[in-house]
Image: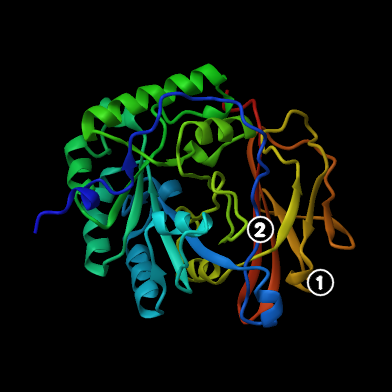
Amino acid sequence: MKPSPINRWRGLALVPLALLISAGLVAIGILPSPPPTIQAAQASEIQKLATVLVYHRFGEDHIPSTNTPLADFEAHLAELRDNNWNVIPAADLIDALEGKATLPERAVVITIDDAYRSTYEVAWKRFRAYGFPFTLAIATEPLEQKLGGYMTWQEVREMAADPLVTLAHHSHDHGHLVNYSVSARASDLEQANKVWRRELGAVPRLYTYPYGEYSEPYEQEIRAAGFRAAFAQHSGPVWTKSNRFALTRYAMSGTHTSVSRLNLALKSQPMGVTHFTPSDPFLKQNPPPPIEMTIDEAAGSLSGLTCYLGGNTIATEQTDRTIKVLRNEPLPLSRSRLNCTLPLGGGVWRWFGALLYLPGADD
């Protein structure tokens, strides 16, 4: 049966070219969801919506940093099926964040960045076999340049005809756009939009930040451009108070491809962070300003909370429900990711992640 136009272009719509209208600054949404071991009254206040996974390459073992070995990928798919995880389209998650829908328990969203050929040749047929929907984020310039290792636009059109596939915007040149000027980001977006309209007739309504890097101005530009939501790449579950324009995702590539890592991500619960500083991940001083978070009382005891910066444990100080990260040394240039975890028992953890970005190395 030929797919309907709605299914064929799922996730696509015309996005206005009027960009970069300055709106009020929006706080970075980073908050929680309920574990099975806490009381129902607490759980009702911290509601998890979904776990979002991000992949890049499949079975491309010669590029390990962004690859998921094929055996691991197949084990992930079996784990999701055999343990009754509900893999849903990204649009359903956005509907829930907007208060328009209720998601099933154990909801999972699968995303893939960059449109490498292994998505077309290796992953797609496996997702079809399992009936799992997924979102593919495409930067237009590599396809325009017909770079080796990437899909073609004809292959993208084939995938767009599959009702399981949602397409997402991933910039034009896939640069470190967080370092670009406002006008340069506007130009990049306009270039990409022209290509999308030429090749598919419309522009996706979901955006994915290259490298997961964003700032408050960049986020506001994406909002003003008419996108429904944007994905970053710091980890943590998505909950009812997550920021739609800085959505968290767990990386499933590189050193994070084991089934145990997958289960850690799937079972994670929101930390319940109600306030985080610095509000803008794009830092203007180094050492950075104070890094603090306030955690909702519904999260329960904070005993056992541990924070990591750049993969290393970092000291913290607690005052009531506020956790202060104790770091006075400069951060490395470019991306750093803060992760804090809190054990709940039974292999379940509350999890909070945040991006910290210092310009310099990627300029």
The quadrant where residue 206 appears: top left
Quarter of the picture holding the N terminus? bottom left
Q: CA distance from mark 1 to mark 2?
A: 18 Å
Residue at point 50%, 64% (across, down): 50
Mark 2 = which residue?
A: 31
Quarter of the picture holding the C terminus? top right
Q: Residues within 10 Å of mark 1 (few under 14, many from 20)?
A: few
Answer with left or right where residue 65 lies relative to residue 124: right
Residue 57 lies, in percent from the top left, at 35, 49
Is any part of residue 118 visible from this angle? yes
Is any part of residue 61 visible from this angle? no
Mark 1 = which residue?
A: 303
Answer with left or right where residue 221 lies relative to residue 140: right
Residue 27 lies, in percent from the top left, at 68, 43
Q: Is residue 123 above or below residue 22?
A: below
Q: Nearer the viewer, residue 80 or 204?
A: 204
Residue 279 lies, in percent from the top left, at 72, 41
Q: Nearer the viewer, residue 176 or 84?
A: 84
Residue at point 21%, 54% (across, down): 162
The quadrant where residue 152 appears: top left
